[in-house]
Image (spheres, grey):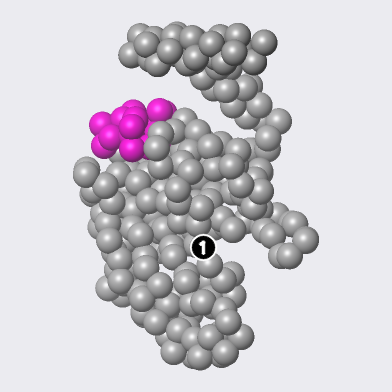
Amino acid sequence: MTFCIGIKVREGIVALADTRIVRGSEQSNKQKLAEFQHNGQSLFTMTSGLRSVRDKAITYLDESLRNDSSDVNRLYQIVNRFGEQIRRVKDEDGAALQSTNHKFNSHAIIGGRLFGDLSPQLFYVYPEGNWIEAAEDAPYYVIGRTYYGKPILDRLLTYDTPLRSAVGLALLAFDATRASVTDVDYPIDVAVLSNQSTIPTFSRYTEADLATTTAWWSNTLKDALPQLPMQWADDLLANSQSQGVNQSMQQQ
């Protein structure tokens, strides 16, 4: 499976992707956060689903831009063309994939900034090729394992979250997912693009690189649990303990 997250806040955008690939009993690591170049600008793509669909669509997109890039100076135009290539791949390979019980389920997150964009942009592309853009009321997208990291994001992430904190929340969403499943794991790739830059910064981190941070988070949660206000459960617990004593006396 996959865990990929894209976040857009007021100060810029963040992308994080795991690298775990599972095929039956075999495990390997492959890059899922990929850099894409256009007219000297660096973009990033992340996808879930069949890698063959992703690779073919990216190849077709690159070919399309090489043949005609005269009108492409904003990121949404790149996303439009990527959607066209997803539909093209579906037309070519959809029936064959279906005949072998493979779903055409390629979801993508594309981010970056072209010369015509006023700020970094972030888009979510559906398997049908249509897309939506990250906004103040929808500042993040997750593809792959989507459920486990959502609670912390929905509680703490807003459009006004500082970019530094957004990077931390992306890591904690990954950490929550990794703790619950076996097909999401290190190393992780991270990209950051602030409003002051036009080119994302990419970096890869191993489990050892982030051990101090994740251990601090786990220990903080453990230390906070005994401080949880539990007065509401006093009667519940007292009655349970009282019933336990009565049952013990009756058995004697």
Figure check: 218 above or below 139: above
Name the residue: 51% across, 77% down: 103
| Prevailing secondary structure of the magenta residues | helix
Question: How far across and how far down the image is residue 51, in percent?
Answer: 59, 70
Tell which of 88 and 236 is nearer to you: 236
Question: How far across and how far down the image is residue 140, in percent?
Answer: 35, 46
Question: How far across and how far down the image is residue 214, in percent?
Answer: 59, 26
Tell which of 36 and 249 is nearer to you: 249
User: Which quarter of the image is occupied by the C terminus?
Assistant: top right
Q: Is 44 displayed left or right of 245 in the figure?
A: left
Figure check: 167 above or below 61: above
Residue span colored magenta: 153-167
User: Which quarter of the image is occupied by the N terminus?
Assistant: bottom right
Tell which of 72 and 138 is nearer to you: 138
Would you name the residue on which mark 1 appears?
A: 48
Q: Is 162 displayed left or right of 223 in the figure?
A: left
Q: Is 22 displayed left or right of 84 in the figure?
A: right
Name the residue: 33% across, 14% down: 232
Q: Is 10 displayed left or right of 20 in the figure?
A: left
Is residue 176 at all visible to an observer of this figure? yes
Name the residue: 22% across, 43% down: 136
Figure check: 248 above or below 100: above
Image quarter for residue 162? top left
Residue at disc 1, secondary structure: strand
Mark 1: amino acid: Ser
Figure check: 226 above or below 124: above
Reply yes or no: does residue 159 show up in magenta. yes
Is residue 194 at all visible to an observer of this figure? no
Name the residue: 33% across, 37% down: 154
Question: How far across and how far down the image is residue 91, in percent?
Answer: 44, 89
